[in-house]
């Protein structure tokens, strides 16, 4: 990785990266900055939205993980990201699955495989990531918050692994065989602006759309969002929305083109997916704009 500025993203399953930071990834890749994606599982337990591929489900042919590996390759090609890896190598950790709690957030599934990521030894999994950190030497890392943004066990585990690995990678005496120590200057947690989501929902409802994100009230609780006061950065990558949407289409088993993500884009335009928000978890906030937010994750470095 020869770029002067290098970004590492740690995500749980294929498609999480595109939904969360696809526009930022495309923008930075186009600008010649280093972008490295580490995906912790192949998403073997995901719901399949393509009827002719339902045979890939875990309880049938169990081929979804390999298929999603190909979807991820295609999505990264659309974003211009050439460095993407699976934590510990493909197949090391399996998608843990999930179920929905009555209150609307994800919780662990009743059963999961022995090598499910949720059951991974934290030090072992973090050490796999230490090797990547010391190789790539990123100044910035992006992962989830402590709740995995919505409770999915693999998202929570990705948060734990990323945060612990960042600490271990900086310790000179830890696993000298993995390379020289490296301290990541800034760590961000992915976020969705509460005010932006409320405004988007209001505009959808005013336009007569009552099905996109059905059940979500623009005036009610929005647990998957972050209060604007908690936000530290927003990256406006509106010029790269086409690449993000193409990458979303590449994740065809998981993202329906007639589903809520594309409905938001169709109704609200590029602004809904072209501006991505972040919370600062480690490091100092750099120079900010009139809105009090950084416009670049490398601000101040």
Image (cartoon, rainbow, N blue to C red):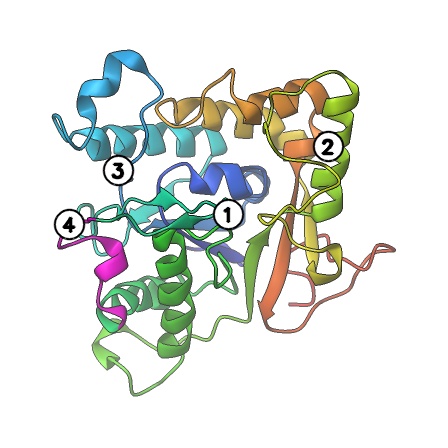
Q: Which residue is mark 1?
A: 103
Q: Where are the magenta residues, as a range?
A: 111-122
Q: Are marks 1 and 4 in contact (CB under 8 Å)?
A: no
Element at label 4: loop
Q: Nearer the viewer, residue 57 or 84?
A: 57
Q: Position of residue 259 (x, y in %)?
A: 51, 21
Residue 114 in magenta?
Answer: yes
Quadrant of image for the N terminus: bottom left
Mark nearer the viewer, 2 or 1: 1
Q: Which residue is mark 4?
A: 113
Query: CA–CA distance between discs 3 and 2?
Result: 30 Å
Query: CA–CA distance between discs 1 and 3?
Result: 22 Å
Element at label 2: helix
Q: Are marks 3 and 2 in contact (CB under 8 Å)?
A: no
Element at label 1: loop
Along the horizontal axis of the image, is 158 left or right of 143? left
Mark nearer the viewer, 1 or 3: 1
Q: Which residue is mark 3?
A: 45
Q: Position of residue 204 (x, y in %)?
A: 72, 24
* On screen, residue 297 above or below 247: below
Lower sequence index among marks 1 and 4: 1
Along the horizontal axis of the image, is 215 left or right of 113? right
Query: CA–CA distance between discs 2 and 1?
Result: 22 Å
Lower sequence index among marks 2 and 1: 1
């Amino acid at each position: 990785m020869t770029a002067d500025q290098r970004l590492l993203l740690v995500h749980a399953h294929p498609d999480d990266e595109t939904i969360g930071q696809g526009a930022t990834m495309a923008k930075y890749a186009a600008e010649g900055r280093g972008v490295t994606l580490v995906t912790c599982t192949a998403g073997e337990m995901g719901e399949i939205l393509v009827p002719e591929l339902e045979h890939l489900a875990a309880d049938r042919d169990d081929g979804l993980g390999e298929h999603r590996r190909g979807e991820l390759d295609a999505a990264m090609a659309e974003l211009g990201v050439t460095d993407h890896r699976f934590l510990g190598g493909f197949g090391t950790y399996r998608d843990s699955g999930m179920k929905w709690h009555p209150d609307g957030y994800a919780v662990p599934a009743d059963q999961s495989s022995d090598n499910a990521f949720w059951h991974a030894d934290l030090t072992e999994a973090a050490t796999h990531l230490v090797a990547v950190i010391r190789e790539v030497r990123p100044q910035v890392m992006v992962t989830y918050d402590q709740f995995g943004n919505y409770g999915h066990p693999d998202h929570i585990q990705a948060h734990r692994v990323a945060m612990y690995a960042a600490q271990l990678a900086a310790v000179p005496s830890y696993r000298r065989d993995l390379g020289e120590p490296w301290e990541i200057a800034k760590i961000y947690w992915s976020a969705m602006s509460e005010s932006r989501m409320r405004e988007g929902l209001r505009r959808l409802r005013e336009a007569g759309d009552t099905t996109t994100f059905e059940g979500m009230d623009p005036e009610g609780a929005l647990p998957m969002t972050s209060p604007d006061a908690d936000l530290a950065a927003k990256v406006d990558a509106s010029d790269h929305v086409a690449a993000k949407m193409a990458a979303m289409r590449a994740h065809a088993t998981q993202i329906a083109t007639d589903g809520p993500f594309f409905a938001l884009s169709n109704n609200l335009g590029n602004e809904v997916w072209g501006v991505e928000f972040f919370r600062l978890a480690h490091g100092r906030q750099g120079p900010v704009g009139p809105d009090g937010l950084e416009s670049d994750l490398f601000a101040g470095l």
